[in-house]
Image: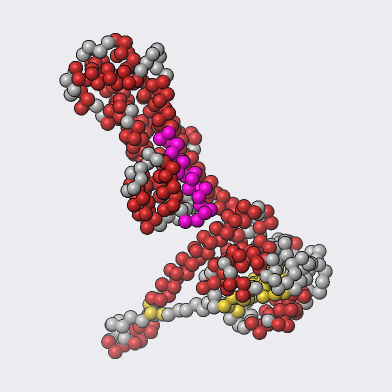
Amino acid sequence: MQQKIVDFTNLLRKSGIRVSVAESIDAFTALDELSLADREVFKDALRTTMVKRSEDIATFDQMFDLYWSAFYDGLRDSFDKASGDMEGDFDLDQMMQALQEGMQNMGGDQELDLSELAKALLTQDLDKLEQLIRDAAENAGVERIENMLQLGFFTRRTMEQMDAEGAGDQLRSLAQQLREAGMGDAEADALLELIDKFLEALRKSVRNYTERQLQQQNFDYMEKFRRESLLEKSFYNLTEDEIKKMREVVVRLAQRIKNVLSIRKRRLKKGKLDLHTMLRRNMAHGGVPFDLIFKQRRKERPKLVILCDVSSSVANVSRFMLQFVYSLQECFTKIRAFVFVSELGEVTPIFKDKDINDAIEKALDGGDVINVYTRSNFGFAFHHFWQNFLSSIDNKTTVLILGDARNNYNDPRAWCLREMHNKAKDVVWLNPESPSAWGFGDSVMDKYLPYTDVAEECRNLKQLSRVVDRLVL
């Protein structure tokens, strides 16, 4: 059972559910008090100990049914059907009684010559059969199955690993010996028929297990495919459900960046060997490097000012950028966030007082500081920033602007951006429109381009994470 829990834990991890070692130990502890016989309680116990986030419950339930419930139930149904399909007035209990008596007449020693599989088949020990199938499948390498065309191959390999053919021969030989020991012909024939049906039920169960392994592999593949698809899907086309899933993807990407930063920080703490300085300082020792000198490089954390267009056409870019930045806020010295459509307002305090998701929703709604139900006017917003907040920019500040630069034919006031550019370390502009559309119609992106250090199309999370990588790493 413990090995099955470990296998199930690995399966959950491959499916994207984070299960720590401590949570696995909690699951083992719970199993001391529970039995697999009550599957609903067993399932609840595993879910309680292994799942931390509500969005993972659906995946857990699917994987539990795939791993625990359906196979055992299918195994039981197959063997019930095998005995139920016997011809005539067959009674399984009478057959088992006759079998026991026949083996006693033989002296009771023949049972010892049977393999574990033969014994499990004869006694319909389903728990033992399930374990034998799982072990044989593992030895057959069924976890490498990739497509439907390999079902037959891995089913045969698993049956060979179990030596199902040898077990069948042993049971047929036993039936013949029972006949010679006095069992009636009708009963002996019925026993041979039952053995064939049990072997067929075993073969179907092995194939069912192989199909389930393929489903598990496909589930992992589809999960990865869905995550990759979300990364490259345009912000314009996201559904409400996908926006919720994207939050989780952003959290994972942010965590990946944090991990990279953590490794880099450890390396910087040690530093690289400074050969020239080390030789110079060890001249007193005849050049023998008694004292090792390391170069210490320190990358300063940037200050960040974000100007987010929160009009409906750009809202999703702003949503995920804000989530990204505030998930990584310890990577920046200071963050100030502003939102605008035409008016400009600061929303930095919202992120101090609220949960990040609530703060983002509040900011996208204008944060009680601007009216979002108006027409875009970048020039007006930039002028307001120049008048009131230009002092927040210095030569260590990166200004990050999110917007499509659709200015509704208003004055772009590009000189305001030029003033920001003159004071800032960098001005980065992310535009959800393709560069081929910049400057056409009411787009004034071409007016702003000379005052940006980086201007990139940003239509999906993959492009957005690339920019954040560049800012932080």
**Where are the magenta residues, as a range?**
52-73
Q: Is residue 105 left or right of residue 94?
A: left
Q: Quadrant of residue 361?
A: bottom right
Q: Residue at x 61, y 67 (%)?
A: 359
Q: Residue at x 79, y 64 (%)?
A: 440
Q: Residue at x 53, y 46 (%)?
A: 222
Q: Position of residue 204 (x, y in %)?
A: 42, 28
Q: Residue at x 53, y 69 (%)?
A: 328
Quadrant housing the N terminus: top left
Q: Position of residue 136 (x, y in %)?
A: 34, 36
Q: Nearer the viewer, residue 108 or 270?
A: 108
Q: Is 184 a magenta residue?
A: no
Q: Is 57 a magenta residue?
A: yes
Q: Position of residue 189 (x, y in %)?
A: 32, 13
Q: Residue furthest right?
A: 409
Q: Is residue 228 left or right of residue 418?
A: left
Q: Position of residue 236 (x, y in %)?
A: 69, 56
